[in-house]
Image (spheres, helix red, strand yellow):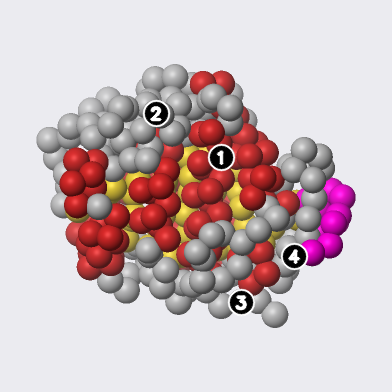
Amino acid sequence: MKSGIDLAVTGDLRHADYEATYGGANSFLRRRFSKSLDGVDLAVVGVPLDLATTNRPGARLGPNAVRSASAIMAWERPYGAACDPRKVLAAIDYGDVAFDFGKPAEIADRITREFQTILEAGVATLALGGDHYISYPILRAVAARHGPVALLHFDAHTDTWTDDADRLMDHGTMFRKAADEGLVLPNRSVQVGIRTHNPDPMDFNILDCPWIHANGVEAAVRRIREVVADHPVYLTFDIDCLDPAFAPGTGTPVSGGLSSAQALGILQGLGGLRFVGGDVVEVAPAYDVGQITALAAAHVGYQFLALYCASPAFTPSA
């Protein structure tokens, strides 16, 4: 293991070099900051949007908080992972999607176009939010590339409420829109950790928090594998899936959620599914305590990189 300085600027696309956690430029896992997609397998992309929140704002500060927290784990491979994504994935930190907050009508299309550019180059994405609405314009780009996907959705909320007001942005209605537009396949999708009432599940398969607590991680893994089968999978992880004891820094916390260990255990059991993209959203650092929410989100993001390494959809670049 070599030691470096500002690996976010000087590091190779694949490296396991060491940099002090308290110094250097804070890219995600010390991956190189770059807009070049040449020879890249996966791009980490920040989407600092929180105009769609219905409770506490602040998730626009989430991407950089997660990047900062990720420094503490950049020196080692994810525990229990079948591969070391630092050495297998040619990964970059693409920086953030730029948009004009004063022109909200343009933001969704701007996000979609940015992700289409990346995906059309044959590069997978991990998005760092931002509020959960960002998954909707990203899914438009993903479905255009891969067709309708199975959604693996970790959350306290189903986010399939009816948008009676036809709001331009709402982080509680976007998966209803995604299903209505044929971007996701509800009967092949699984929502994990739900603990808020919604009278219309829209054919999504729900493993709510009481079910997880009663049946455990292994049963959840089996059920997810049964439902998803060999379909392309998009992972979306709202950090409020975790109990506020493990993730207080979020806009709409709900008690009774999963522990970090339960959530990571489920993800670790899903190696070999056909993951094609993912996001981690709703980290609002102003409400965090000791960076534990951002740290949990960074661990989830790192687990996604390990899952993508093992995905049949992944073909390493030269």
Which kind of residue does numbered mark 2 sit on? Pro
Give the residue pinned by disc 2. Answer: 244
Measuring from the top left, give residue 273's x and y in whole percent: 38, 69
Residue at the extreme left of the image, as rendered: 199
Which kind of residue does numbered mark 4 sit on? His
Q: SS at mark 1? A: helix
Magenta span of residues: 1-11
Give the residue pinned by disc 3. Answer: 316
Q: State the mark number for residue 295.
A: 1
Measuring from the top left, give residue 79's x and y in whole percent: 54, 60
Tell me the distance, in whole angstroms, between the alpha carbons under discs 3 and 1: 28 Å
Residue appearing at x 45%, y 32% in the figure: 247
The image shows residue 32, relative to residue 298, as above or below, that is: below
Tell me the distance, in whole angstroms, between the alpha carbons under discs 1 and 2: 14 Å
Tell me the distance, in whole angstroms, between the alpha carbons under discs 3 and 4: 15 Å
Mark nearest the camera among 3 and 4 is: 4
Residue appearing at x 37%, y 63% in the figure: 269
For residue 177, which quarter of the picture? Answer: top left
Magenta stretch secondary structure, dominant: loop
Which kind of residue does numbered mark 3 sit on? Pro
Of residues 290 and 160, the one nearer the viewer is 290
